[in-house]
Image: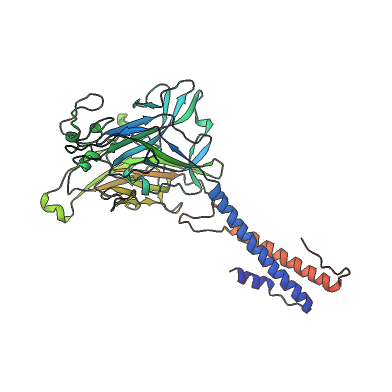
Amino acid sequence: MCRNLVTILCAVNFTSRATMVHVREGCFFALAIFLLAISAHNSQARLANENGVKSSTFLSPKFVLGPGSVANKYYYNIDFPKGHIAIKNFNAEVVDEAGNPVPLYETYLHHWVVLRYYQRKGVEIPKYHGNLGFHQSDMIIVQNSGLCESGLSQYFGLGSETRKTDTHVPDPYGIEVGNEEEIPAGYEERWLLNVHAIDTRGTEDRLGCTECKCDLYNVTVNEYGQPLKPDYIGGLECCYDERQCKLRKGFVSARRGLFMRYKVEWVDWDSSIVPVKIYIFDVTDRWKKSDESKGLTARHICQIEYQVDSCDSGMVNDGCTDKRRVSLSIPTGGDVIYAVAHQHAGGIGSALYGEDGRVICSSTPTYGEGKEVGNEDGYIVGMSSCYPRPGSVKILDKETLILESNYSSSVRHTGVMGLFYLLVAEPSQKPNSFMRSPFDANGKTEMPNFVWVGSLFVAAVAIAAAVVVAAYRRRSPRQDGYESILI
């Protein structure tokens, strides 16, 4: 394209050979300026995109696990970037005291979640504390925009799939935090990390331990001392903090210190960033629609986990699938920027559909096939993420959505989840993509029209100047033996 542009710009007839030589030299000089201008625009945009993103890696407080033991810890006021910023990415994994990543078959990461909250100034709580219930007068949990009335308030969070699930927020979007105008007087913004990890070394039934089957933990009451329901055979209520899963007879191994290592990427907030809302949907949501005539408001009671019963033995080779569906509706729609599902072992995929049946996002698991970290055999090590081109996938205001979660039911699974994480931007906000980054959603470079027009104008001016100088030189021969330099 550049060669054609220069051919057009330089295709001029001249009456003097000398003039033609000087003009052609000017054309090549203009071409150099033209290419340099494009290169400069590209390199500056990439530098802003790459170097403008800050990142820091932190460690949680240490938690100690022995074979078969459980840690379900709540760490308050964790290290986190300060100021009015836009979060671009958040990743986490379990590491040992030497900083080595720990494989899932040794320490199963059931989940980690990060919550945002406001803490009253002058009131301190220990760095580690039990679950306060998030209803303390000195704490205000800043919930995401999701629908669930209790639970699932986190801004970030995954499970065993954390190492191979793409979670970055594409330009020019960001998750806005640290805005002083939103923080109540007398409070400050802080962050909480909840880590639920299970040491499965030497366990009698490794899958059963990760699925929190109550008989393996010898549990009949929950962590608050309340009796379990008769039909509750596995889930979070049986694998709470410091519980012990059944070990193989005679197995002995050392306890060890572990950490959650998490990396945060962000940029300083400015007007070119488009904020996104975080939604977390749950397939167990018992949505009760509002009824104004009866004075009833909408209710979203989320169970968070559920049980998959095994199918008939004769159907195992004929595709046993447990399919759960729920209808949901959000009051305000927008452009879908990112989406991903969260499932446990046995999961075979999840999807979110629009009211007309269109697929908003389909997210499927990747199962490991080896022993190395990030590829542990039989574990979900990643979930596919959706990055639609901005503006191409929309949710309408009050549109009824359908969430579907599918699990293999060839064997029974307890304590499974069917969550869907969604980032939505208001459709009225048009991204200033060039000012933030010249890359589209697929990572391809897109040069805005005004850059091409500006570059062409520079080249045209340079060629015109070359013509003038050449004509002047033809009429005014050198007197001092030196050619003038035009800057």
Residue 185 coordinates in the image, percent (x, y): 51, 24
> Residue at coordinates 54% horizontally, 50% vertically from top-left?
49
| Of 331 and 228, the residue lying toward us | 228
Could you tell me which quadrant the C terminus lies in?
bottom right
Any part of residue 439 in sight: yes
Residue 391 coordinates in the image, percent (x, y): 45, 52
| Of 217 and 309, the residue lying toward us | 217
> Residue at coordinates 47% horizontally, 35% vertically from top-left?
80
Q: In which quarter of the image is residue 285?
A: top left
Query: Position of 338 compared to 409: left or right?
Result: right
Any part of residue 355 in sight: no
Count of number-bearing discs: 0
Taking the view exactly as shown, the residue that stands out farthest to the left is 314
Q: Is residue 113 above or below residue 316?
A: above
| Of 101 and 180, the residue lying toward us | 101
Query: Position of 367 compared to 59: left or right?
Result: left
Query: Position of 371 compared to 448: left or right?
Result: left
Could you tell me which quadrant the N terminus lies in?
bottom right
Taking the view exactly as shown, the residue that stands out farthest to the right is 479
Q: In which quarter of the image is residue 305?
A: top left
| Of 170 and 9, the residue lying toward us | 170
What kind of colouring is applied to the model shown? rainbow
Residue 11 coordinates in the image, percent (x, y): 68, 75
Residue 338 coordinates in the image, percent (x, y): 41, 48
Q: Is residue 23 above or below residue 39?
A: below
